Image (cartoon, grey):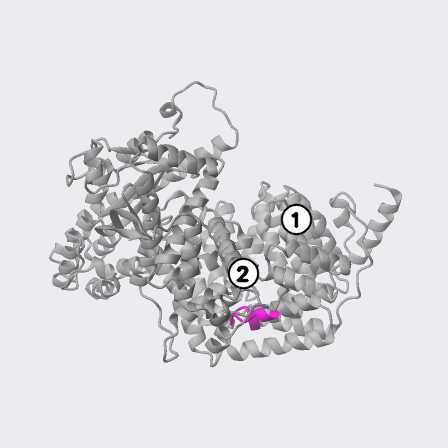
């Protein structure tokens, strides 16, 4: 460090009243200007009022509270011109929830072009491919603008570079002008340091931020947030003394009303994960009971009840990906009301899964519904047997508890244990893949089986069969289907097809032996295989609702195959285990659709419809959005999406009478089906392998650099383009693209996100090119505004025709 730099750092440290900070980070990495004067007491206090109000549970539905908080934020803005905090609040609570952010974004861009640094920051913090440039411009225009430094640092951290984020985080912290800024920037900087494996500096930063008594000393709600972050860091320490301090701090915070629901739950999980040997269950329960007594709303009290449930270890199906229906069934089985729940379920199932009499087509489920109607309390024994035959083990255990039947409980527990064992196996395979991909090498010379490794698809099959033998017996060897460079899969069944017969796998119409037969008998569908870009063998096991054969064509390209309709995963696939919502996947000569995931997506539609129906004029305002006015080069900008997906949802739901009607599982599941049928169209083009088809397949792989990730993304884009052209209401398929654009800053686990964003950008460029020649003059498209903001205003058939033109350009349409 030079002498000049040392003087600068010392001066900045004094201004921050925390001289340790820069010393811990190795000195000041760059010269910074003198911080701007602190925000005045009145605007600072009003902004704190607004921010605190927004943290109260139920705020998003309380119009009176929102109006009061927004008034406080506007007062703060008037008292501190150029301070971004109030403007951020207005963006987040006036415009973002009610889907009117595009015009506001345009205003930010216009002011940024006029040289206003706060506007450049506000535009950049909304995201998009130009976010870094806009945040950089804000920092260049006003080097003292702490929010610009923070925005750049946070994006750097989110990109996976915590070491590089530290410098920007340090600058933001040093230039803070308000206690709330200091709190937020301290938490952010502590996370950068933690990510850079500098836990001790992170802990010291938070401690001394809490101890500061200067003009930016933290107030109550701000202290609670910083203390919660400090508790998290302490609980993750390897030092027992730190863990004890973190546990004590977390217990104290659990009993306050200063934290929101998620913050309190994170603390609870931290205590459970790091301090179970140091803190008694009674202490944690007492803190939660104190918090429940202090709860301000019914929703907050409910969240604490959930925390108390977590304290007891969660549900018996921990790690599974079920559905709201399955949760209700377990409760109803114990209460003797399963017949009521099953009748309601049959009414919402897709029509293809229900017979004319309203009962499920699948025999085991049909028998279950009938048993529930004739033996509602289970005393005759029919209901218990029907639950076991259908593979509804959790419901059978709930029924056994109400009956006191040890035999039923044991048999149900065996089924649950088998599925839990396969779940654990899947996590073990994940851990092995992470170990191998890290570059570790096992030089012992032992076989895979001796090392406890699962390297091949056959080894995975053997392990699954072993773990389920107690409930399913020992299955025969499963037929294996190979797709050349794109992967391999154990035949999922349930019967051999004509293609299988031609290829010598088995006689057409005969049941497929092995895992397919085993899991079909357990009421499950199992997808066990290795796919392109997925890294290692994998298993997905879902509860089966129905099976059907389908064939047809999309865009002149034929498809055929078996469709497995499922509802919730007992063993989520690798992508789902990493947090993705997987609603379907193509396989063999068919695909599956998980109605449990579709159901969770539908819950978002219902929430959206409820919020907008309850607020007068909200639907009209959202659907009236015409978009940000931008220069021509930004017209095709696809991110930030600024609520485009939800505006399209409102357009789909709004009927001629103005009422909002949520699509059913049938309609939403059908869109998933069309996407998967797009994959089957490709499969029909490439399989079964012959010399000509193999050459086409190699050519396709070569066009994508033989990269597994690039191939996977290309396949997903092709399938979704089919859905954009062929879905009954193509707007439902467009929503998938717009959701992907909305999630641009969060990266992605599956290839779908990047594939959909790329496809959206390509279609918008096509639309822009057509716009230049007047092709969209009669569609109401404003050429001076962003196209993504206007998609909800375009007639569905015009969107379909646009997608068909894109499909033709890619060789996917043979019409």
Check if residue 100 falls in the magenta segment: yes
Q: Nearer the viewer, residue 285 or 29?
A: 29
Give the left or right position of residue 497, taking residue 155 as reference: left
- Seen at 87% across and 49% down, the residue is 7
Instruction: Estimate the x, y position of residue 151 in percent, counting from the top left.
Output: 66, 56
Q: Are marks 2 and 1 in contact (CB under 8 Å)?
A: no
Magenta-colored span: 92-104
Instruction: Estimate the x, y position of residue 763 in percent, counting from the top left.
Output: 49, 56
Q: Image height check: is 346 above or below 584? A: below
Query: Which residue corresponds to mark 1?
Result: 203
Tag 1 or tag 2, which sits nearer the N-term? Answer: 1
Q: Dot 2: few (<14), some (14–19), or many (≥20) neighbours within 10 Å?
A: many
- Residue sticking out furthest to the right: 3
Find residue 42 and report its image quarter: bottom right
Instruction: Estimate the x, y position of residue 484 in percent, counting from the top left.
Output: 36, 32
Q: Image height check: is 327 above or below 97? A: above
Query: Which residue corresponds to mark 2?
Result: 768
Q: Nearer the viewer, residue 640 or 605?
A: 640
Q: Dot 1: few (<14), some (14–19), or many (≥20) neighbours within 10 Å?
A: many
Give the left or right position of residue 129, taking residue 775 as reference: right
Location of the N terminus (image quadrant): top right
Find residue 369 and report its image quarter: bottom left
Element assignment for label 2: helix
């Amino acid at each position: 460090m030079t002498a000049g730099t040392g003087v600068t750092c010392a001066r900045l440290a004094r201004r921050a009243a925390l001289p340790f900070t820069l010393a811990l980070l190795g000195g000041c990495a760059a010269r910074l200007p003198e911080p701007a004067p602190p925000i005045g007491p009145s605007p600072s206090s009003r902004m704190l009022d607004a921010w605190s109000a927004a943290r109260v549970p139920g705020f998003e539905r309380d119009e009176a509270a929102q109006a009061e908080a927004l008034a406080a934020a506007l007062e703060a803005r008037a008292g501190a011109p150029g301070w971004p905090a109030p403007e951020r609040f207005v963006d987040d609570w006036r415009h973002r929830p009610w889907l009117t952010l595009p015009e506001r974004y345009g205003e930010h861009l216009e002011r940024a072009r006029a040289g206003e640094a706060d506007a450049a920051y506000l535009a950049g913090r909304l995201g998009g491919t130009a976010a870094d440039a806009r945040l950089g411009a804000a920092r260049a225009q006003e080097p003292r603008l702490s929010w610009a430094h923070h925005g750049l640092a946070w994006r750097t951290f989110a990109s996976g570079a915590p070491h590089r984020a530290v410098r920007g985080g340090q600058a933001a912290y040093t230039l803070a002008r308000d206690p709330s800024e200091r709190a937020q920037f301290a938490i952010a900087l502590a996370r950068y340091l933690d990510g850079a494996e500098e836990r001790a500096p992170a802990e010291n930063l938070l401690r001394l931020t809490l101890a500061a008594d200067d003009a930016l000393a933290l107030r109550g709600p701000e202290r609670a947030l910083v203390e919660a972050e400090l508790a998290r860091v302490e609980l993750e320490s390897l030092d027992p003394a730190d863990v004890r301090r973190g546990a004590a701090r977390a217990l104290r915070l659990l009993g306050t009303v200063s934290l929101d629901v998620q913050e309190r739950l994170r603390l609870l999980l931290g205590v459970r994960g790091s301090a179970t040997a140091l803190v008694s269950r009674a202490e944690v329960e007492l803190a939660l009971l104190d918090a429940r007594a202090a709860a301000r709303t019914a929703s907050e009290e409910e969240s604490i009840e959930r925390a108390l449930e977590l304290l007891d270890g969660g549900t018996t199906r921990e790690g599974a990906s079920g559905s709201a229906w399955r949760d209700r069934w377990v409760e109803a089985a114990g209460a003797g009301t399963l017949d009521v729940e099953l009748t309601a379920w049959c009414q919402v199932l897709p029509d293809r899964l229900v017979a004319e009499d309203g009962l499920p087509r699948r025999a085991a489920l049909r028998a279950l519904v009938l048993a529930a109607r004739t033996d509602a309390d289970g005393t005759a024994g029919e209901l218990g047997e029907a639950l076991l035959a259908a593979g509804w083990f959790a419901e059978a255990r709930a029924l056994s508890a109400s009956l006191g039947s040890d035999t039923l409980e044991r048999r149900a527990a065996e089924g649950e244990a088998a599925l839990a064992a396969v779940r654990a196996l899947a996590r073990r395979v994940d851990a092995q893949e992470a170990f191998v991909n890290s570059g570790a090498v096992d030089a012992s010379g032992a076989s895979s089986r001796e090392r406890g490794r699962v390297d091949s698809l056959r080894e995975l099959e053997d392990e699954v069969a072993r773990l389920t033998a107690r409930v399913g017996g020992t299955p025969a060897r499963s037929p294996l289907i190979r797709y050349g460079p794109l992967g391999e899969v154990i035949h999922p069944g349930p019967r051999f097809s004509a293609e299988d017969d031609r290829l010598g796998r088995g006689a057409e119409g005969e049941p497929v032996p092995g895992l397919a037969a085993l899991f079909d008998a357990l009421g499950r569908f199992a997808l066990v295989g290795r796919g392109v870009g997925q890294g290692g063998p994998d298993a997905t096991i879902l509860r089966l609702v129905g099976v059907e054969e389908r064939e047809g064509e999309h865009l002149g390209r034929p498809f055929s195959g078996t469709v497995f309709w499922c509802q919730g995963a007992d063993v989520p696939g690798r992508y789902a285990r990493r947090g993705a919502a997987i609603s379907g996947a193509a396989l063999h000569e068919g695909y599956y659709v998980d109605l449990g995931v579709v159901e969770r997506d539908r819950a978002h539609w219902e929430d959206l419809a409820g919020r907008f129906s309850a607020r007068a004029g909200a639907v009209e305002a959202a659907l009236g959005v015409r978009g940000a006015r931008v220069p021509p080069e930004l017209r095709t900008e696809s991110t930030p999406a600024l609520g485009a997906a939800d505006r399209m949802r409102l357009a789909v739901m709004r009927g001629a009478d103005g009422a909002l009607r949520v699509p059913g599982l049938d309609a939403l599941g059908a869109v998933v089906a069309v996407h998967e049928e797009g994959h089957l169209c490709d499969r029909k083009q490439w399989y079964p392998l012959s010399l000509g088809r193999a050459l086409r397949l190699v050519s396709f792989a070569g066009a994508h650099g033989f990269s597994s990730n690039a191939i996977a993304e290309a396949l997903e884009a092709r399938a979704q383009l089919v859905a954009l052209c062929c879905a009954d209401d193509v707007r439902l398929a467009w929503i998938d693209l717009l959701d992907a654009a909305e999630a641009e800053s969060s990266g992605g686990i599956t290839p779908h996100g990047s594939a959909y964003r790329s496809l959206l950008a390509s279609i918008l460029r096509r639309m822009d090119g057509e716009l230049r020649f007047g092709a969209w003059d009669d569609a109401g498209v404003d050429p001076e505004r962003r196209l993504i903001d206007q998609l909800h205003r375009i007639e569905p058939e015009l969107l379909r025709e646009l997608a068909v033109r894109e499909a033709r350009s890619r060789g996917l349409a043979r019409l």
